[in-house]
Amino acid sequence: MAPEVLAFRHYTIAVDVFSFGVLLSELDTHQIPYSDKQSGHGNRVSDAAIVSEVLRSGLRPTFSSSCPQWLMNLASECMAGEASQRPEPVDIVSSLSNHLALLRNEGKFPGCT
């Protein structure tokens, strides 16, 4: 959830952009966000502690080491702490379209149209 929602501040469509960044992390890791976070005792960190870390220190979901850098960058931009720093949805579509075209040209997704 976007920081502005967690802090009960006014929010805009930028919260959906943040959520899209979180979704990209889920698609990459095949895990629920923050499920890898553990306390010092090896227990799963509570939801309240995660909310606190998202607000206080900018905690964000993790990505696998095999995640393409461009996808990680896009997701990170989508999850910027300040809503005004997040990309517009049209820019996200453009970025994804450009990268899909590059992958198609490299023969990595020949069946995609």
Image: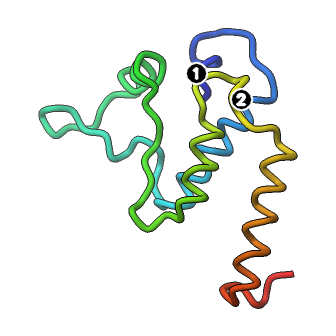
Q: Residue at x 73, y 67 (%)?
A: 99
Q: Residue at x 80, y 82 (%)?
A: 112
Q: What residue sits right under mark 1 in the picture?
A: 3
- Vertically, is 100 above or below 52? below
Residue nearest the observer in this picture, 32 or 69: 69
Quadrant placement of the N terminus: top right
Badge 1: few (under 14), some or many (20 or more) residues near its Cα, within 10 Å? Answer: many
- Image coordinates of residue 9 in percent, x first then y, are 67, 9
- Vertically, is 46 above or below 55? below
- Image coordinates of residue 40 in percent, x first then y, are 14, 32
Left or right: 55 with respect to 81? left
- Vertically, is 24 above or below 33? below
Quadrant placement of the C terminus: bottom right
Q: Residue at x 70, y 78 (%)?
A: 103
The local secondary structure at tag 2 comes to helix
- Vertically, is 85 above or below 113? above
What amino acid is labelled 1 in the image? Pro
Residue nearest the observer in this picture, 72 or 105: 105
- Image coordinates of residue 43 in percent, x first then y, are 20, 37
Q: What residue sits right under mark 2 in the picture?
A: 15
- Image coordinates of residue 72 in percent, x first then y, are 55, 53
Give the quadrant of residue 81.
Answer: top right
The local secondary structure at tag 1 comes to helix
